[in-house]
Structures are given as C-alpha cells and as structure tokens.
Image: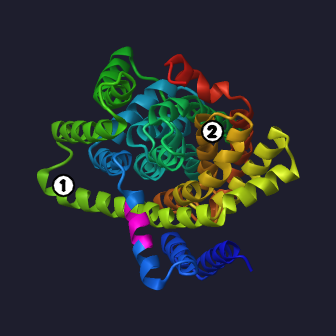
Amino acid sequence: MDTALMCGLIMIVVILVLLFIGTPISISLGCGAVLAMTVVLPGTKAALMAAQKSFTGMNSFTLLAIPFFILAGIIMNNGGIAKRLVDLAKVLVGRLPGSLALTNVVANMLFGAISGSGSASCAAIGGIMGPMEDKEGYDKDFSSAVNIASAPAGILIPPSNTLIIFSTVAGGVSITSLFLGGYIPGILWGLGVMVVAFVMAKKRGYKGTQGVSGAVALKTFFDAIPSLLLIVIVIGGILGGIFTPTEGSAIAVCYALILSFLYRTIKFSDLPKILLESSKLTCIIVFLIGLSSIMSWILAFTKIPNLVADSILGFSDNPIIILLLMNVILLILGTFMDPTPAILIFTPIFLPIVESFGMNPVHFGVMMTFNLCIGCITPPVGAILFTGCKVAQVTIEEVIKTLLPYFVVLIAILLLVTFWSPLTLFIPKLAKLI
C-alpha cells in the first residue's frame, strides 16, 4: 500500500474510533495525526514535527483576537449590558403578538453582535427573558425554542470568533471582509426566526405587551447607546483602518470593562473569576487549533483534499450540484461537530474546490459558517441547544418539535445565501474591500 495512503487511512480510522468511544475532538484529532505521522517519520522526529506544527498553528497574531473577544463577551455577560439590550428590544417590538419572544430574538442579535458568542447570548438573554415569558403564560417549549433558534445569529453578525478561525485556516482571507459579509446573512437569520415566532405566537394566542410612553422609550434608547457603541467603535475602527481586528478585540475588552464598572455591575473582586472562565474557553479553542495544524500537515502529505476534490468534481462539474452536496455534508457533520473543528478540518478540503469555479472565499466562509450555525441548535451535539435547554430547564425532547419550523426557514435562507452571492458580498464591495 502507498505510504501516503496508509498514513491517511491510519489517521481517519484512529480519529473515528476515538470519537466513537467519546474522546474529545481535540484529543482525537491530535492522536490520529501524530500516529499517522509516525508512519513517515521516526518516533522522535514525528514528536518533534508534531510539536513544531502545533506551535506554528497557534503562533498567530490574528488568533489573539479570539481570547480578547471571549473575555469581552464574558465581561458583558456579567456587566449588566444584556439587561439594557433586552429593554431596548422590548421597546422596538413590544406591541406585536408574542412580543416577548420577538424581544428575545432582537436581544440575541444585539448581544451576539457585541459578544460574538451564540452560547453566551443564549445563556445571558435566555436567563433574563425566560422568567418574563413564564410570567406572561408562554409555553416553555415555545420560549426556549425561540431563544435557541435566534442565538446563532450572533456568530454571523460581527465580531465573530468563528469567522476569525476561518480567516486563519483559509490562508489569510480578510477578516474585515468576512465581518462585513456576515451582516446581511446574520440579520436574515434573525428576521427568519422572528417570522416563525410571530406566526406561532398568533396561533397560540400570545398577546403583545403594553406600549411605553415616548419619554420612557427615549430613555431606554439612551441607556442602551453606550452598549451599542461597542459595535460602532470596534467595527468602525477596523473598517476605517484605525486598528486591526486583533487590536479591536483588545479595545472591546477595555470598553466593556469600563462600561461595567460605570454600571457598577462588576467589582474588582469579580475579575479573577472572569479571567479564569475566559482562559478556560480560550485554552479549549487554541488547543484545538494547535492539534488541527498537525492534521493539516498530514492532509497535505497524503493529498486527501485532492482526492476528495477529485471525487466531488468527478461526481459533477456543475457548481450548483457541488454546493448542494457540500451543504448536505456540512449539515450532517454539523449535527455531530462544533463549528470550530469542522472549519479547521473541512476548509482546506472544500475551499480549493469552490475557488476552482470562481466562488469568492468570503462568500464561502460565510456560507460555511451559516451552515454550521444550524448544527449548533441540532442534536446530538448542538452546544447552543444544550445551553438553551439548561437555561430554560427543559429537555431536548420537549423543544425539538417546536424547533422544526425554524430549521425549515433557516435552511431556506442558507440556500439563498449559498446561491445569491450579493447577500454576502454587497457590503464588502460597498466598502471596496473586494
């Protein structure tokens, strides 16, 4: 058997076996890649090469943005910012049927756009909205489904750690272009969830909340401005060339911390706990990136991406069929795998294929992220699904039936994002980044 083929086969088999017995994805990838590496290199050299590749994969200035955005999100989660965004969302949609559910969606979009984390948004906003919806007589399956379905919008609306990871794996695709490209698909995600929630709320007879006076609405808006300014400062600064995305992430931390101190919702004694929580999350992501770099070396050596590309192109040379096939593969894989490892594994395989028929990498990155976001709310591994169920204290079985209409709408939007590139590329082109 050819050495490269044997190397690739060993890696795939070891990874699948370890995943099957419940080993964490990062450990599975690392063990499979290192064992495969020993086929072509002596043990000592294989260990040295694995260490070098792992360090090289983590040694990136761009990736420094991830721990800072994670820290900023955790500070905001503890700093009273979520409550102000919920109050603003209530003013915006308060009179509509099922207004509290619609408020949940808008608040998730706003908080996600600031924190860059779907799970953090689901926990923060769900924790505030859940008791309010219970008090108004909303069924738990309905309120939790709305919270779960809308939370991933924050992964698409910048800043987004997932898009930063794609930029790194894709060979330095502009983060600014990816951030701007995520706006319209992310907003469409939120609007799609709102439409479904509105229809279901009318069927269940949920009423709107009482309107507020103009003075109260104005005060609520002004109270939320400092929180909303974070988006303007970070994205505006990146777009204006004032600072890089990595520098913008550090500014986001400083701004969120100052704001939380001004709101008096965080004390200095809270900082060690916040730093420890953000460190744990950062370590998980960066460790995974480092080990996936070893796997990337094996993929390049075995030419597995070329084999997969040849197989897909051999199946059809029609771009529409190829993109549909990729979406199906990613939708299936997304139910078993978080977005980060999926992007690390499949970007090197799929990106050359789509570039071969002229698809812009920014368009592909947003399409791939949108696809994998659906996996975040899909059993058996969906992180946001589990977070939402835990916050609402409901079982997955209770929620999944109510989530089905959302899946239908989100897949329809995914197809729109896939086959109509202006949805992704309009804003980057308007900013003259493409």
Which of pointers 1 and 2 indicates the residue nearer the eye? 1
**In the picture provided, is 209 more to the left or to the right than 319?**
left
Residue identifier under label 1: 271
Part of the protein shown in magenta: 49-55
Where does label 2 land, which residue? 193
Which residue type does callout 2 highlight? Answer: Val
| Residue at screen point 33% across, 26% down | 237
Q: Secondary structure at mark 1?
A: helix
Tell whether 262 sits left or right of 416.
Answer: left
Drawn side of residue 266 relative to residue 348, left or right = left
Q: Secondary structure at mark 2?
A: helix
Residue closer to the observer: 75 or 20: 20
Q: Quadrant of residue 357?
A: top right
Q: How many marks?
A: 2
Q: Which mark identifies residue 369? A: none
In the rendering, at what x and y percent does residue 238 appear? Answer: 36, 29
Secondary structure mainly formed by the magenta segment: helix
